[in-house]
Structure formats: C-alpha cells, structure tokens
Image: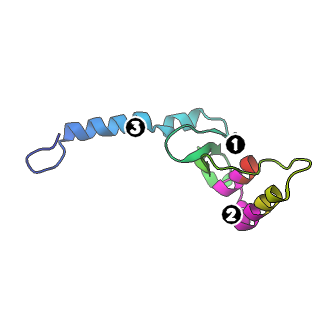
Amino acid sequence: MKNAFGQFSDDSMDAFNEAMAERYDFASKKDDMPCNKPKRLSDGSGKSHVVKACCDDCGPKGKLIKFGQKGASTAGKPKEGESDRMKAKRKSFKARHGKNIAKGKSSAAYWADKVKW
C-alpha cells in the first residue's frame, strides 16, 4: 500500500519482492539443472528454451541462458527432401548469427543454432 507521500511501505515492497522471487526464482532452479542440457521454458519471457551453460567463460556455477523465440517456426534439423524455402531459412539464420554462434556455449545464438536450427 502507498503511504501519504505516494511511496510504497517497506512491508508491501518486501511482500512484492518475495512474490517475484517465488515466481521468477531461477537461482535455486539453476543449481538443480544439469549442465549443457537445454529444456523447454514455460514462463512469460517470450523465450522458448533455457540452458545452464557450463564452460570456462561461464563462471564456477555456470550461466543461465534463455534463447529462442517462442512460437517461431524454425527449420529444425535438416531433413531428406527438405524444401528450398527451409534450406534458405537455415542458411540465413546461420549467416546472420555466425559471429555469435562462434562464441561458443556462453552465447544464446550457439544454443539456438544447436537446438532450433
């Protein structure tokens, strides 16, 4: 609740922060996640996948990376008899994000390339 000066009281701010920590508590979930194993994400972030990246650049506890546009129609893995349109989509993605894919496991582009393209 707001006080007379239009500011939130300490109690209401603490309650809000606690509720947000429960809803978006990736810190505790990150510790339980296996390294370098992507999984589907079902929060409201607009991203479709999440992975705990464990590499030299990611620090001792790893790095939580969200990637992929939710609802996007990606080309998926190459298939036999694939249409020219899908081949072009895959080629465009890899050309557009090639520099970031090359950064390795610590970049979202690397994981999007590996999982979605």
Q: Position of residue 111 (x, y in %)?
A: 69, 50
User: In the picture provided, is 94 more to the left or to the right than 50?
Assistant: right
Q: Position of residue 31 (x, y in %)?
A: 56, 36
Amino acid type, mark 1: Asn
Q: Which residue is mark 3?
A: 21
Majority SS type along the magenta span: helix
Amino acid type, mark 2: Asn
User: In the picture provided, is 89 more to the left or to the right than 53?
Assistant: right
Which element type, helix, strand or loop, lies under badge 1? loop
Q: Is residue 107 visible?
A: no
Q: Which residue is mark 2?
A: 100
Residue occupying image coordinates x 71% and y 55%: 110
Residue occupying image coordinates x 30% and y 38%: 16
Mark 1–mark 3 contact, CB under 8 Å?
A: no
Give the mark nearest the N terminus, 1 or 2. 1
The magenta span reads 92-112
Cα–Cα span, label 1 and label 2:
17 Å
Which element type, helix, strand or loop, lies under badge 2? helix
- Vertical order, 61 against 88 (above or below): above
Q: Residue furthest left?
A: 4
Amino acid type, mark 3: Ala
Question: Which one is closest to the eye, mark 1 or mark 2?
Answer: 2
Q: Position of residue 93 (x, y in %)?
A: 73, 61
Magenta stretch contains residue 87: no
Q: Which residue is mark 1?
A: 36
- Vertical order, 100 against 51 (above or below): below
Give the mark nearest the N terminus, 1 or 3. 3
Residue occupying image coordinates x 87% and y 51%: 82
Q: So how many labels did they put on this image?
A: 3
